[in-house]
Image (spheres, grey):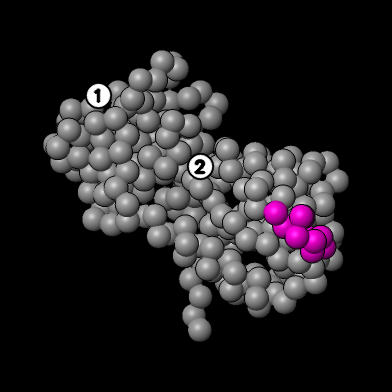
């Protein structure tokens, strides 16, 4: 069976287990990143855009449940979290799900099953792509790749659609430049001026549709939509 490449964050402090998972996912043609500590995992997950996070509960610097909550609160989109742990009691599983986990695998596990669960979680996350997104006067139809501002169509390029979708999913939070570049180009990223050009073009199309200053720049971070009642200041580029 041909698998679509997925971007996976592997959060595991045991070097042997981490290496086995990363090598296996690499062998599938997927794109795994690795974090051995919770703080690094939160930093990566809130800057990059992953399809699934594989999260070990036992980390040296943070409780895995705290890491899960931080990722769920700060990721640029609602990324599924698959917890990896040696704890198999019902109470432990319940704490994991209550902490925001989307699935749960106990160690030891079959790497093939792990990949299947990642695919299932990624597909589940895509089910919401077809639902209309509403941010103030903006309506985005992901399946049709169309957007309107109070009923006025927004002319979207392919890059503009991807940018607007990421910003809508994150609203009212900002999306980092790194995460937006990943959405547009994956690991083959050009210089940051290319992203600025696409953001500028999208901003102009939103303005033409009746939404001036719809995208604001957050210094040292990235961009966010400003189509509701936001008061946080931003700077335009």
- Residue located at (38% from left, 40% from top): 168
Q: Is 91 in the magenta?
A: yes
- Residue located at (79% from left, 64% from top): 88
Of residues 102 and 76, the one drawn nearer to the viewer in this rendering: 102
Q: Which residue is mark 2?
A: 76
Q: Is residue 168 left or right of residue 155?
A: right
- Quarter of the image for residue 214 reads top left
- Helix, strand or loop at label 1? It is loop
Question: Where does the image place residue 210, in percent across and percent down from the top left?
Answer: 18, 28
Of residues 101 and 24, the one drawn nearer to the viewer in this rendering: 101
Residue 197 seen:
no
Q: Residue at the front extreme? A: 90
Q: CA distance from mark 2 to mark 1?
A: 23 Å
Q: Is residue 138 left or right of residue 165?
A: left
- The magenta stretch is 85-94
Q: Which residue is mark 1?
A: 212
Residue 106 seen:
yes
Upstream in sequence: badge 2 or badge 1 = 2
Q: Is residue 189 above or below residue 213?
A: below
Badge 2: how crowded within 10 Å, few (<14), some, or many (20+)? many
Question: Where does the image place residue 181, in percent across and percent down from the top left?
Answer: 47, 45
Question: Where does the image place residue 23, in percent across and percent down from the top left?
Answer: 71, 70
Of residues 199 and 65, the one drawn nearer to the viewer in this rendering: 65
Picture quarter with the C terminus: top left
Q: Is residue 207 above or below residue 94?
A: above
Badge 1: how crowded within 10 Å, few (<14), some, or many (20+)? some
- Residue located at (70% from left, 54% from top): 94
Q: Is 86 in the magenta?
A: yes
Q: Is residue 149 above or below residue 188?
A: above
Question: Where does the image place residue 143, in percent across and percent down from the top left?
Answer: 28, 57
């Amino acid at each position: 069976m041909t698998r679509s490449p997925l971007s996976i964050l592997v959060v595991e402090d045991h070097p042997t287990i981490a290496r086995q998972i990363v090598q296996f996912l690499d062998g599938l043609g997927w794109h795994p990143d690795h974090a051995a500590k919770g703080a690094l995992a939160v930093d990566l997950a809130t800057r990059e855009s992953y399809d699934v996070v594989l999260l070990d509960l036992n980390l040296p610097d943070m409780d895995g449940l705290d890491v899960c909550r931080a990722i769920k609160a700060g990721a640029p989109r609602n990324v599924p979290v698959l917890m990896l742990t040696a704890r198999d009691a019902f109470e432990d599983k319940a704490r994991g799900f209550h902490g925001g986990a989307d699935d749960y695998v106990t160690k030891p596990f079959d790497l093939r099953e792990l990949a299947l669960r990642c695919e299932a979680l990624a597909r589940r996350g895509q089910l919401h792509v077809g639902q209309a997104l509403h941010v103030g006067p903006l309506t985005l139809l992901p399946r049709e790749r169309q957007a309107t501002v109070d009923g006025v169509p927004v002319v979207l390029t392919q890059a503009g659609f991807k940018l607007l979708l990421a910003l809508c999913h994150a609203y009212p939070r900002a999306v980092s430049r790194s995460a937006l570049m990943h959405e547009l180009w994956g690991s083959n990223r050009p210089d940051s001026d290319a992203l600025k050009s696409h953001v500028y073009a999208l901003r102009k199309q939103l303005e033409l549709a009746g939404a001036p200053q719809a995208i604001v720049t957050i210094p040292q971070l990235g961009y966010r939509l400003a189509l509701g009642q936001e008061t946080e200041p931003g700077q335009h580029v």
